[in-house]
Amino acid sequence: MARKPADQSVNREAILLAAADVLRQNGYEATTMKDIAARVGLTAASLYHHFKSKDFLLLSVLEIGLEHAIARLEPLLHATDLPCSERLRRMIATHIIEVADNTAVGAAMVFEIRSLMNAKLSPRNGLTEADYAEFIERREAFFRRRDVFEGLFKQIIRQGINSGEFRPVDAGIVTKAMMGAQNWVGVWYKPTGRLSGPQVAEIMADTFIHSLLNATPQPAPRQETSHI
């Protein structure tokens, strides 16, 4: 395949998806910009034209995955014509299907967060102090947005508790448990496996919803008294 020059139009999302796939296969430390460039038919120099370093590229992969998820879930949270259980069910299912359709990005959310936290930019590849400041600012913004993402689930769980639809639980801990289970779909899900993404989503959503529903005991039926 011919390599594309730096000034040729390149689909940014295609580069990010390719990067996520290479990261899943090799891991962050073993992945090089050359590996990612080769996946999309670019030279390494051309890839540096689009992303200043591997750290910037990793951050971009995580940013696009997170922003896409938030955009899909926020409208579901605010669909107040639906009960909390149905809104949460749709949020869980939507997120899981999204992860199943983009397992490489989902896996990056599981395995590469620590790489992002530990990233140490160097002056190699022409990076400057301004580049470093930009990276730190974007990284901090990413983690704030991740809190926003988790907050969507916390909000609906708390609303369900306040309405009596859900039993009293620690919304923060339950949310983290749900996030872990949903994100790990990107690690173990196989498109050629026994179940489709929507089927997996239905099972997992049903499991979480039933664990939260407030099963208030019903009074025992009154027995009839014989008057013989």
Image: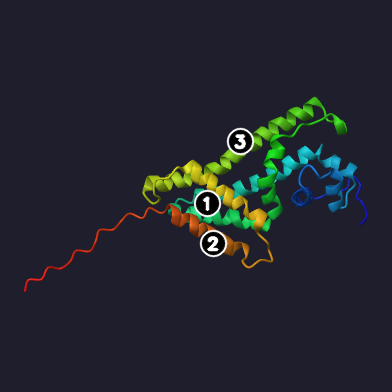
Indicate which label's residue lies in the foreground, 2 or 1: 2
Earlier residue among tags 2 and 3: 3
In the picture of the structure, the residue carrying the numbered disc 2 is: 202
Which numbered marker is on residue 76?
1
Q: CA distance from mark 2 to mark 1?
A: 16 Å
- Location of residue 36 with respect to 123 vertically, above or below: below
Residue 162 x/y as whole percent: 38, 44
Please name the amino acid that badge 3 sits on.
Arg
Q: Nearer the viewer, residue 113 or 161?
A: 113
Residue 32 on image: x %, y %? 84, 44
> Residue type at mark 2?
Glu
Of labels 1 and 3, earlier in sequence is 1
Q: Secondary structure at mark 1?
A: helix
Q: Which dot, 2 or 3, sits closer to the camera?
A: 2
Specify the farthest residue to the top. Answer: 129
Circle number at residue 27 = none
Can the viewer see residue 40? no
Near mark 3 (Cα within 10 A), the count class, few <14, some 14-19 or many ≥20, is few
Helix, strand or loop for disc 2? helix
Check disc 3 and report the residue beneath it: 144
Closer to the observer: label 1 or label 3? 3
Q: From this viewpoint, which residue is outermost toward the right?
A: 2
